[in-house]
Amino acid sequence: VNFAIDVDLLDGGNMSVGRDGSPYPNEECAMNAMYDLNMGLLSVDADNEDVLVEKVAAHRTRYDPLQALRLCSERGRTRAVTALLIELELWEDAVDGALDLGDGDLARSIAGRCRDADLRKRLFLDIIGRLLAVGPTYNHAVICSIMEESACISITDVIMLVPDGEKIGAFGD
């Protein structure tokens, strides 16, 4: 059963002014509470996770992202948690979440959005480190493309991550 409320329909543009045109300060609080309730209800059912992720990605709603993060985390909505971490610019946790989901492309996209150069480099190195931790089945070409994409990682940075005994000749190009 879908209990979610389409709060976008409730916020019709004239909901926040009185007859005299003055704003209702408490009505905005009530609307925010409705958005929080909607996010909470969406997080209850795993079938609603796509809608939940879309609402987070759309930046349209006035929900409390920390409350939504707590609810989604408690209810195991990992894709929604990752989307909320991106929204909150918690880059390291967002990259970890994307990698836990097995979505390397999303992890790379998140790392690329980080504006702090040192943190961005560390995020890309974390992604490469996770690839290398898989073992000898990792794809050297993917690691090289991450190096190119990041524009801040050198071969020396990657060599430091390669486990002892691994061939590093594949990175020669």
Image: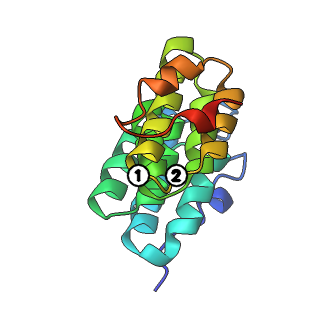
Percent x, y for residue 91? 47, 31
Q: Are marks 2 and 1 in contact (CB under 8 Å)?
A: yes
Q: Amino acid at mark 2?
A: Tyr
Q: Report the amino acid beneath label 1.
A: Gly
Q: Residue 25: x and y, percent?
A: 50, 32
Q: Which residue is mark 2?
A: 138
Residue 148 visible: yes
Question: Is 95 above or below relative to 74?
Answer: above
Write the residue at 61% across / 39% down: 170
**Element carrying mark 1:** loop
User: Camera-side residue: 123 or 169?
Assistant: 169
Residue 23 seen in the current view: no
Q: Quadrant of the C terminus?
A: top right
What color scheme is it?
rainbow
Give the Cα distance between marks 2 and 1: 6 Å
Query: Pointer 1: what residue?
Result: 135
Numbered circle sitting on residue 102:
none
Residue at screen point 44% across, 33% down: 126
> Is 18 rendered above or below residue 8?
above
